[in-house]
Image (cartoon, grey):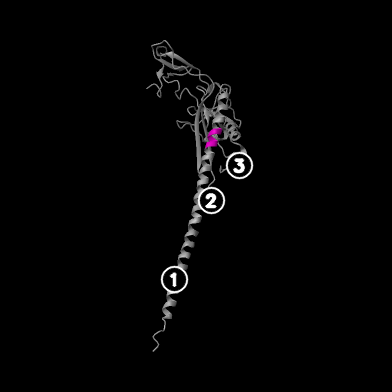
Amino acid sequence: MNKNRLPSQKIYDYHTGRVSASVSVKASITVEAAMAVPIFFLAVVCLLYLMEMAAIQTAVRSGLQYAGKGLAKEAYVLQAAVPSKLEADVVNAIGADRLNRSIVEGGSGGIRCHKSWMSPTTGICSLSAEYRIKLPLPLFRLPSPSYEIKMKIKGWTGYVKAGLSGEREKTVYVTQTGIVYHEDYHCTHLELSIRPVQASDVPGLRNEDGGKYYPCEHCAGSGSGAVFITDSGNRYHSSLGCSGLKRTIYAVPVSEAVGKGACQRCGK
């Protein structure tokens, strides 16, 4: 018997096993790379999208501040905030091309300032700018998220003195036709939050007490277009110069407000 015969079959099986293990490792690495690379790029895209959202928010805030300064200059003459003019000033400050290339839905026409208003009594302007952004994955059919930026700015109409100097008696504020006196000069019954609306929308609007709006006896007609309403009133006006939109306020000692009751809002 030949004792020098080699076990060739075992050696062949040994090499075959090593080749199979190497191919399995390479395949697993390929599968992991195919899964990780798309996730990495998705994370990068999301980061860039968040940076663009922050840049748009900063730009709209700066544009609204620029528009508010222009409104403050005209507060002495124009005692109401015109949303269309504010929107145009915001777009002009940001740049129409920048907005049209941005993620803002509607581009330069996607900025809305319809909630802005100004108090003709104090000259304080409450500014608001709303916009929506386009989602990068429209396949999910999710609604576009909306954002609102608010700020307040004082019109250049002077300052309000906090009472009568040299008097020990409490100072209250009255109007020519009012039946109550007010302890707070900024009471909402004294401040008129005037805002323009379309005449066709008036039947569906309600004031802060839930009441309807009726035509002003002095200025409102039956025409169409923009009219002016207040949150606490129940009349709509076709002219900003109407006497129903003005308040002549007098600061008097409380002893001179004989016959007038205290306001339910500020006189408690």
Nearest to the observer: residue 120 or residue 89: 89
Mark 2 residue type: Pro
Q: Is residue 144 visible?
A: no
Residue located 61% across and 38% down the image: 96
Nearest to the observer: residue 154 or residue 235: 154
Mark 1 residue type: Arg
Whether 44 is among the magenta residues is no
Mark 3 residue type: Asn
Query: Within 10 angstroms of label 3, few (less than 14), some, or many (20 or more) residues?
Result: some
Label 1 near label 2: C-beta < 8 Å? no
Residue corresponding to mark 2: 138
**Over which residues does the magenta segment extend?**
58-63
- Calculate the distance from the C-alpha at mark 2 to the C-alpha at mark 3: 19 Å
Query: Within 10 angstroms of label 1, few (less than 14), some, or many (20 or more) residues?
Result: few
Tell which tag, 3 or 1, sits nearer the viewer.
Answer: 1
- Residue 230 is situated, as x and y percent measured from the top left of the image, at 51, 28
- Calculate the distance from the C-alpha at mark 3 to the C-alpha at mark 1: 60 Å
